[in-house]
Image (tube, rainbow, N blue to C red):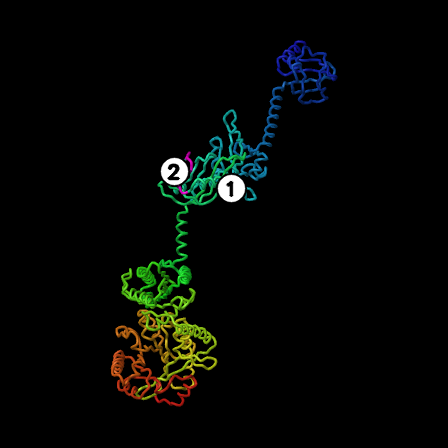
Amino acid sequence: MPQTLKQLNLILDTITDGVMVVDPQGIVIYANQAAEQLLERGSLIGHSLAIPIPADKIQFQDINLIRPSGIAWAEMRSTPLEWEGAPAFVIGLRDITARKHAEIALQESELLFHTLSKIAPVGIFRTNEKGECDYVNHRWCEITGLHFIDSHGDGWIAGLLAEDRESVMTEWQRCVSALQPFNMQYRFQLANGSVHWVVGRAEPELDEAGGLCGYVGTITDISDIKANEERLGQAAAVFESTREGVMITDARRRITMVNKAFTDITGYDNQDVIGNSPGIMSSGRHNADFYREMWANINATDHWQGEIWNRRKCGEVYPELLSISTVRDGKGEISNYVGVFADISKLKASEMELEFLAHHDPLTKLPNRMLFLSRLQHNIEKARRQANKMAVLMLDLDRFKDVNDSFGHLAGDDLLQMVAERLTTRLRTSDTICRLGGDEFVVLLEEVNQPETVAHVATQIINALNQTWQLPSGHEVRIGVSVGIAMFPEHGASPDELIQQADTALYQAKNEGRNRFKYFSEDLTRAARERIDIEIRLRQAIEQGELRVFFQPQFCIHNGAIVGAEALVRWQTASGELIPPIRFIPIAEETGLITTIGNWVLRETCRHGQRWREAGFPPLRLAVNLSPQQFLHSDISDVVAKVLEETGFPAEYLELELTESALMKREKEAIEILHKLHALGVHLAIDDFGTGYSSLAYLKLFPLDVLKIDKSFIEDIPKHTDDMEITATIIAMAKTLRMRVVAEGVETAEQLAFLKSRQCDLYQGYLASKPLPIAEFEKFLTDYLPDGNL
């Protein structure tokens, strides 16, 4: 037994864990060397230890050991036993001081990490070895807009902006696979739609074997930086792309920066101006006082704006609109001056052009009405002071419309420019020529005291314009001019009066045959006022239904039967006055009312014609006159078709009469319109034949059925053999062209006998009947009892 105990002691002294036996009071009964070394004491037997007395069962716990060298940590295991017949405890002690210190250091490290993570201005994240997120701090959640729970695993991916998601994942997976650091800029989109730019960085944590433990990284919100970059980029783009020149100087007014527009405008590049004073561009047009006042204003208000003349590198002087602003630093000290300027050369030129166009006709470059009236008023006042006379000449080009209609408006514009140039070269520099509009011009002749002088000038103008004109297009045209003259002070004392009187005289000149001049007189004024009065009353007459349709019967020369009638418009006022067509038809043509009147006559004629057919009257062919304006400037074929459809009047009983002038103005267009009308089934007649162009070459091209001989050839039969020969020739020609012939204005039996001898087909005139109102015409039909028909 002693030998066994000795061996046991030897064994216990060789182990590194301390072993002791204590009684229930904690008195050491036995202790091995390791226990004595652990507690840093000599013999422990008989001593009481400051350790917890174990319970009567196996127990594990960590305890503090107070040693001379300091506190240590031990892992204690206690087991109850009997020692020499008495109860005791075996206590095993293992030194865990190093481990405890490591644990405490780790705890302190983790506490520090969490504290730093909490207060860090950047988002912190950590991943496992698979690259899956297992930790984020509060700032990370603020930046990304995600909850802690949403961040775990791959949940953080959902917070990425959709446009960046694929590229970020690709780069992240590449870094994890290659165990490389991650560094990338990308965006998170928050629930409210806002976007945060971040720069994400992460470093891999490797174990001792080089295996990946995970990643620890940060995200930094760089949204403000990105916004500043964008603003700076925009500012730089604006600086370089703006069309205004920009020049920045330091506080000493030395140039530090210029943009591309500066170079484009001035011709100076960076090397030419950097470090120099803006004075190198001085034009010399401004004196020292100008610059002194400018800088005084800048010093007082930190700003100046105005127009200034500078010089380009090539030496050219140009105007610019310059704005100078002062830039101050945080202390309020001047750091820079910024000059922004625009080249206003073109603007200045445009202003001059606009000023010119405001007072001149843009086509001919002649003074316009505004400038003419101003000069006219000035010369009236001057003439009053000096007792001089002057004249206003109103000009209207004859046959100008034919040029427009035949060759187009561009040709017309070319002709107007040529006329303006010729007028300018023919008149004195002191005279004023104005284009009022269209083909109307007005001339102011200063200091002309004799009417004969004005007449001489008017004659020169007429002769100058009444020549063959060679247009740029190669066409040759011939025009004329009518001139109306008003003298100051005889014919007016104000600009408006003189222009009005000259216009009145012009109207008379045109009425008397054109290509001539006419002085103003009171008779002309009365005539002009009468025209105005007629126009006003005519418009009211149309609205109030004062127009009437009269019918003049047409007879067959061979048997005397009524075969038709010509519809003629009359104006009967509310008082019963019958105004003849010669007084209002020309005015209707001038004002454009003729189309309204003509369409009304057409509709009324067809309506009455259908009513007579339904009443049992013999069939009559009714003739309606079409004015040139109605024929060429309205869709007359559609108008006729609609009237025939509305009234039910048969097309074969309607005859449309046109004058030679209407057909000859625009031959190709007239032929096309005539064919459209002929296709409707109506008959077509040429009226007043022989008074217009009388061109047989053109006449045979028109699809005409009837030729009407003008009464001017009939009225002198049989007195004048020339008229008889002309009439016979017209009848023979019409027969050759297979056209029926109607003679107008037959008033004597001799005239009728002659027409019958020449085989004229129809006639109308006062010999048989004057134009009759509808009621009288119906009575005439009833009383006449015609025995022939169409």
The residue positioned farthest toward the front in the image shown: 386
Q: Dot 1: few (<14), some (14–19), or many (≥20) neighbours within 10 Å?
A: some
Task: Name the dominant secondary structure of the magenta segment.
Answer: loop
Q: Nearer the viewer, residue 506 or 391?
A: 391
Q: Nearer the viewer, residue 572 or 641?
A: 572
In-image side of 426 versus 585 (left or right): left
Is any atom of residue 373 visible in this view?
Answer: no
Q: Nearer the viewer, residue 160 or 279?
A: 279
Q: Is residue 704 above or below residue 210?
A: below
For the point 65% across and 18% down, the residue is 72
Name the quadrant containing residue 475: bottom left
Residue 363, percent from left and from top: 36, 59
Q: Over which residues does the magenta segment extend?
A: 274-285
- Element type at marker 1? loop
Residue 586, percent from left and from top: 38, 74
Kind of residue indicated by mark 1: Leu
Which quadrant: the N terminus? top right
- Of the numbered discs 2 and 1, the one sitting upstream in the chain is 1
Circle 1 residue: 161
Circle 2 residue: 269
For the point 65% across and 20% down, the residue is 75
Is any atom of residue 334 visible in this view?
Answer: yes
Name the quadrant containing residue 516: bottom left
In this view, the mark in front (2 or 1): 2
Q: Nearer the viewer, residue 746 or 651?
A: 746
Name the quadrant containing residue 216: top right
Residue 594, percent from left and from top: 40, 73
Kind of residue indicated by mark 2: Asp
Which quadrant: the C terminus? bottom left
